[in-house]
Image: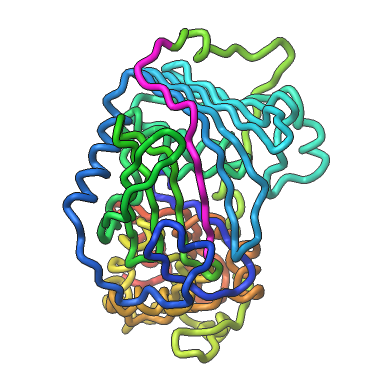
Amino acid sequence: MRNNIFIWTVVVVVGAAFLCLTPDCAGSPQQQKPSNLIIQDEPEARALYGKMTEAIRKTKTLSYESSLREETDGDKWEPWTYRVWMKKPNFFRVETINKDGKNHGILVGDGRYAWSYWPNGRPWFSGEDDDSYKKSRFNVYMEEPAPPGKYSIGYSVVLKKSNCFPIVNPSVFQGINDTLEPVIDWMQNRGVEKIGHEDCNVIEVSYADHQRSQYFWISRRDNVPRKLKSVVRSNKDIITREVWSKVVLNAEIPMKKFRWTPPKGWKQWHPPTPKDKLIKPGRQAPDFELLSVDGGKITLSDYRGKVVWLNFWRVGCPPCRQEMPYLEKLYKKYKSKGLIVLGFDFADDRQIALDFLCHCSVTFSNVLDNSDEAVKAGFFIYGARAAPVNYIIDREGKIADAWLGYDQNSTRGVDVLAKLGLK
């Protein structure tokens, strides 16, 4: 997540959600639903989590190498390695290595700016045409402001385009909070285990009504993790495993590690953004007929003649969870004036999504459908590559406005409603 946006990974095939209560249960999960799961929070586990965060933040320098691999329903994705060097107050370097041992992408933070470049050619970005990709594949770089405590290494282009989604955002070192912390349910101890030469305490952290779990093997010697695992209970469970090695704290790192200047002839390049994928105002809203909360069908064109606020969300998205009460309040205020609020979740297990809507006391209509057709409509046609995404559709079925993210101080949505006669 960056700011008020949550980037999601969509698994197209529909599957069951699994409940994993031990660190290694993902290999042979029990097919249970995590709905209404009540587990007592353990202060000892929270203390270990706090010590881990404090250890990462208080060290003057930190370097490590992570071996990372994701799998979905047993299908393992290509393994990656990423290497990290960080130095206070705001210097960092990340290198991603593919399975062939080649350097894929490099991120350098020089204290003011973050420089991203690809020594062997940059990856293709969704939405690019072949011609523009070929012309800008090599000898290009990105330059972004990286003010202290505000730049997220974990969501950098270099890591994302290498399919590296670190379980612990390296920017915790610079004081950035974990974006999932507001939706923590509970923490529990999961025993003691030896990882390499390190004796580790193992804890599980549950998020968003157990829609997600993270496991940390925390070294008893320095409180820095040596092994990590994430389980996202979606339409197909997404499991990420990491092993940290070569962990070094408070060692001297030469400043040349954090310096980079574009070579002669290289050009600055700007990638397409999630906002670029949204349907532009004035265009007809593409129709769909998909599953509703009660198992019936919702057809968008049936709402012709009314104003529709279409919201793409998912359970594990913190800003989506913040926006849901706002949308419910908006619906109750304007429904008598002809406003339809329509939620759309194409990523989560159906029961998990139903439990969430019930917990939030949502009364407006929702599409709960993770079929291929629903994924095509949400992810590809409506461009909901991140969440939340909001569309306002006028009475003629045309897009009046579209935007990404949720800002509780913004009046953008109600201003559009006012222009459409809803005041």
Residue 379 versus residue 391: which sits nearer the camera? 379
- Residue 329, quarter of picture: bottom left
Residue at coordinates 22% horizontally, 49% vertically from top-left? 46
Residue at coordinates 32% horizontally, 67% vertically from top-left? 209
Residue at coordinates 77% horizontally, 38% vertically from top-left? 133
Residue at coordinates 60% horizontally, 49% vertically from top-left? 276
Q: State the colouring used for the structure image.
A: rainbow
* Left or right of residue 135: residue 423: left
| Image location (x, y in percent) of residue 5 | 43, 50
| Image location (x, y in percent) of residue 325 | 28, 68
* Image height of 250 relative to 373, above or below: above
**Residue at the far left in the pictured view:** 43
Point out the image quarter for the C terminus.
Answer: bottom left
Q: Is residue 244 magenta?
A: yes
The stretch of residues the image draws in magenta is: 237-252
Magenta region, main secondary structure: strand
Q: Is residue 297 magenta?
A: no
Q: Is residue 410 visible?
A: no
* Left or right of residue 259: residue 218: left
| Image location (x, y in percent) of residue 65 | 52, 30
